[in-house]
Amino acid sequence: MNDGVISQVDQPRLNPMFRFQWEKAQDCYVLLYPEGMIQLNGPAGEIMALVDGKRSVADIIITLEQKFRDAGDLTEDITGFLGDAYAQHWITL
């Protein structure tokens, strides 16, 4: 990935500098890092919950489209979020 575009064959994984978890006090998923915490909205949390270094982006899209059938095509939303997460160094490829 040299051009900043997430490919459907990429297998994103969480950057080891972050820890992904459900934060009961915040009532949302968060990314923890040494200097603080990033609160994720619902869709971002759903995507990040599937980022494991084994699933491809295509697998993540299929899983979420099956889970949220009424949402329609989620490809652009998911690849856009993962592109942003990559740019923020939350994930690696």
Image: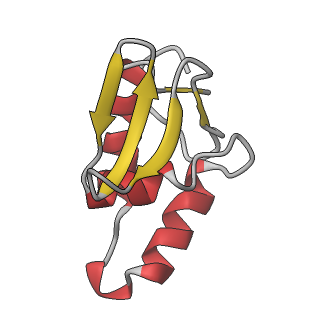
x then y, percent, for residue 60: 55, 59
Vertical arrangement, residue 66 with respect to residue 43, above or below: below
x then y, percent, for residue 29: 38, 51
Which quadrant, please, contains the N terminus? top right
Which quadrant, please, contains the C terminus? top right
What residue is shown at x 29% (from left), y 46% (from top)? 40
Vertical arrangement, residue 31 with respect to residue 90, above or below: below
What residue is shown at x 54% (from left), y 70% (from top)? 62
1 and 60: which one is in front? Answer: 60
What residue is shown at x 31% (from left), y 42% (from top)? 80
Location of residue 85 (image quadrant): top left
The reply, left or right, for residue 64 in relation to residue 93 is: left
Location of residue 77 (image quadrant): bottom left
Q: Residue furthest bottom?
A: 70
x then y, percent, for residue 11: 66, 40
Vertical arrangement, residue 68 with respect to residue 11, above or below: below
53 and 80: which one is in front? Answer: 53
